[in-house]
Amino acid sequence: MRDALPTVFAVMPVFNRLALTDACIRRLSEQTYPALRIIVVDGGSTDGTPEKIRRDYPHVDVLQGQKELWWGEAMGCGIESCLRRSRREDDMLLMMNIDTLIGPDYVGTLVRVSQARHAAVGGVIVESSNPSHVLD
């Protein structure tokens, strides 16, 4: 079934903040959408982030910059990697922030809506302390 689905490449730039990174990878790993590849782009963490990810999440690809990377440069590195790995015209990119809270059907819902609308889609950003308050 995986071959019948577009691959979604979830790219997460990280710089330290190991607890948030770990939680975000766990949420992505619990997705019901089966054709998901997680790519973490480490921008020079000094808290053991790349080592922990490689040890605890062998299914996650970890890219490390040779220098400190900010979000945009790390995301660009991840996108370049996705473009090299993509095998289908309808493969997709999911740009993730490590402090994002998502449910287990998040990726599947984004794919379904994107295919139905023939458009790029994104999630709603809400306040974690007040999920009924939409920020963006």
Image: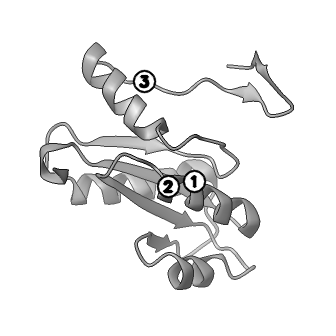
The residue lying at 43 percent from left, 39 percent from top is: 107
Between 15 and 111, the residue placed more toward the observer is 111
Residue carrying label 1: 27
How many residues crowd mark 1 within 10 Å: few (<14), some (14–19), many (20+)? some
The type of residue carrying mark 1 is Arg
Q: Which residue is mark 2?
A: 30
Residue at 42% in and 57% down: 78
Which quadrant is home to the C terminus?
A: top right
Looking at the rendered image, the disc whose residue lies closer to the viewer, 3 or 2, is: 2
Q: Residue placed at 60% from the left, 41% from the top? A: 102
Q: Is 118 on the left-hand or right-hand side of 12?
A: left
The circle on residue 121 is: 3
| Of the pair 133 and 49, the residue shown nearer to us | 133
User: Which residue is situated farthest in the right direction here?
Assistant: 129
- Disc number for residue 129: none
Spatial CA span between label 2 and label 1: 5 Å
Tell me where residue 75 appears, x and y as whole percent.
50, 51
